[in-house]
Amino acid sequence: MARISDMIRERLGECSPAERKVARALLASYPAAGLETVARLAERAGVSAPTVLRFAGRLGFGGFPELQDALRAELGERDASPATLYEATGYGSRDSSSAELLQRAGRAFGDSVAQTFADMPPGDLQAAIDLLADPSRRILITGGRFSGLLGHYLALHLIQMRGNVCPLPEAKVERTAVLAGTGRKDVLVVLDYRRYEPESLELARYVRDRGARVVLLTDPWLSPIASIADVVLPGHVGAPSPYDSLVPTLAVIETVVAGVLTALGPAGHDHLRRNEEVARAAGLYG
C-alpha cells in the first residue's frame, strides 16, 4: 500500500480548502497527528470533525479508523530493524547462487534509485541546491550511525567547491563550539533513517529555534525531523538483504553535488582549482 504521506501530497490538489488544512496539519506532525482523535485533529487544523472524516474518504479510506490502521502499519515499518526484517522476510532460508544474488541486487538497487528519483519533486531538490550553494551561509552536516558516512562524503565534496562548510564533530566539546554561534545564516544538513536517532531530532530543533534552515535526507517513512525541516529529500531503501540500502541516498547526494557545482558557476570552479593548487604545492596528492 502507498504511504499515507505520499497519498496526501498526490491528492492535495483535489482537496477543498478545509480539507487542505487537515492535510497540512497531519503532514506537519506526521504521523502522530493522525493517531489522535477526530476531534483533536480537527482542532489542530482549525476545521470541523466532519471535514476530517471527508478528508479520510478523499484518501480512499472507509473511515477515520481505517486511516489510523494504515498509519499504525506504517509505524511498524518505520521501527523495523535488520533483525526483524531478517525474520519477516525469511531471509535466512534463502539458498541462492552468486549469479542469482547479482540479479537480485541489480533489480533491488536499480528499482530503489529509479523510484527515489521518480518520487522526488524537482522543486524540493532545487531548494536544497539553492541553500547549499548560497555562499553567505555556513553549512553544517551530520548523520547517524551509518548515514553519517554519507554526510561526511557530502561535506568533502562541498568543501572542495565553497567555503564555510563544517561536518559536525563527534566530540561533545568540539560540537558545542561549532553550534555556539548558530543563527539565521546557517544550514543544517542531517541524514536520519529508520530507527531514527533522538539526538538528531534534538539537534535539528536546536538550530531551527535559532533561525537556521534544515535540509533532511531520510527514508520513505520520514524521520520525525521532517515536521520541522525546510527541505525533505526522501530516498527508497530497497536492498537484497535485511539492511536498508543507502545507495539511493548516495545517488541523491551526488545529484545535489552536481546541482551545487552548477549553481556556483565560475566561483565553484575557482574554489576547486585553488584547492588543487594548494594540495599539489603542499605535497598532499600522492
Image (cartoon, rainbow, N blue to C red):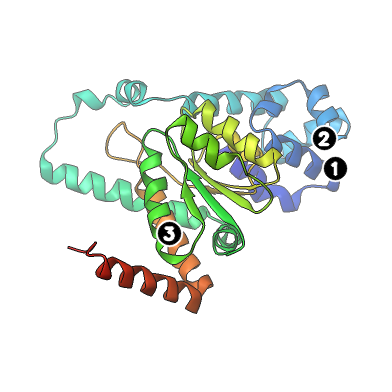
**Disc 1 residue crowd, few under 14, some 14–19, many 20+, Cα 10 Å:** some
Q: Which residue is mark 1?
A: 18
* Closer mark to the observer between disc 3 and disc 1: 3
Q: Nearer the viewer, residue 130 or 98?
A: 130
SS state under label 2: helix
Above or below — where is 26 with respect to 139? above
State the CA–CA distance, disc 3 to disc 1: 45 Å
Residue 236 coordinates in the image, percent (x, y): 43, 45
* Closer mark to the observer between disc 1 and disc 2: 2
Q: Nearer the viewer, residue 135 or 223?
A: 135
State the CA–CA distance, disc 3 to disc 2: 42 Å
For the point 78% across and 44% down, which residue is it? 20
Instruction: State if disc 2 and disc 3 touch (CB < 8 Å).
Output: no
Hey, what amino acid is under mark 1? Ala
Residue 99 coordinates in the image, percent (x, y): 12, 46
Q: Which residue is mark 3?
A: 159
Q: Which residue is mark 2?
A: 45
**Disc 2 residue crowd, few under 14, some 14–19, many 20+, Cα 10 Å:** many
| Side of 124 where 111 appears, left or right | left
Q: Earlier in the sequence, mark 3 or mark 2?
A: 2
**Disc 3 residue crowd, few under 14, some 14–19, many 20+, Cα 10 Å:** some
State the CA–CA distance, disc 1 to disc 2: 8 Å
**The C terminus: image quadrant:** bottom left
SS state under label 3: helix
